Amino acid sequence: MSNIINQTGAVLEKSAELLKNPALGEAVTGLFSWLGNIFIKPSVKEKLELVEQNKHNDKIIAVLMANLEFILEGNEDLQNQLTEKLKELDLLMKQAGVSTITKTNAINLTGNGNMQIGSSGNINPFIHYE
C-alpha cells in the first residue's frame, strides 16, 4: 500500500506540470476528483485544492498522504481504485513520452552493530560496534 501512497504523492508534487500536458490533464483532474471524494474533512479538501492551484509545499503533501494512508488502510476496494487510476495515468504518460513518476523511500540495512538513522532518512556513517 505504501507504494501507491508514494506514487500518489509524487503525482501531487508534479501535478502543475502534468496538468499542462493535454494528454495527461484529464487523468490528473480525474485523480484530484477521486481524492476529493474520499477526503471527508474540509481542511483536507482545502489542502487538495491548494495542490490543484499549485500553491502547495511539502507539508501539505505530507498531510494529504497521511490522510490517504489512514483512509486506504484496510480498504482494499479503495486501494484497487487508486491503483487503477495510477496505472491509467502511467500508461498515458508513457504514450505521451513523459517520464513516469516514481518515488521510492526504501532502505535495507544489514550487518552487526548499532546503526543510527537520522530523521531525514540518511544513514549516519558512524557505525559503532560493541
Image (cartoon, grey):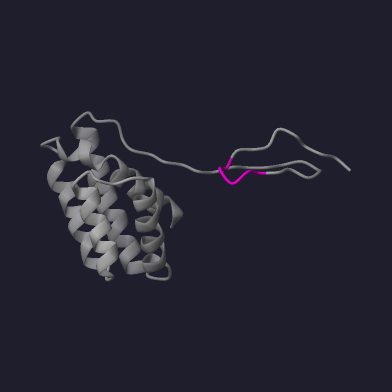
Q: Position of residue 32 (x, y in %)?
A: 21, 54
Residue furthest out toward the top = 97
Classify residue 49 as left or right of residue 106: left
Q: Position of residue 53 (x, y in %)?
A: 18, 47
Classify residue 19 as left or right of residue 8: left
Q: Nearer the viewer, residue 6 or 92?
A: 6
Look at the picture and state if 94 lies above or below 70: above
Q: Nearer the viewer, residue 120 or 113?
A: 120
The quadrant holding residue 41 is bottom left
Q: Position of residue 124 (x, y in %)?
A: 68, 37
Q: Give the quadrant of the N terminus.
A: bottom left
Asked if residue 119 lies in the magenta stretch, the reply is yes
The quadrant holding residue 55 is top left
Q: Nearer the viewer, residue 23 or 66?
A: 66
**How many labels sit on residues?**
0
Q: Residue at x 35, y 50 (%)?
A: 61
The magenta stretch is: 117-121
Q: Nearer the viewer, residue 41 or 114?
A: 41
Q: Residue at x 27, y 57 (%)?
A: 47
Asked if residue 104 lies in the magenta stretch, the reply is no
Q: Residue at x 20, y 49 (%)?
A: 52
Q: Give the quadrant of the C terminus.
A: top right
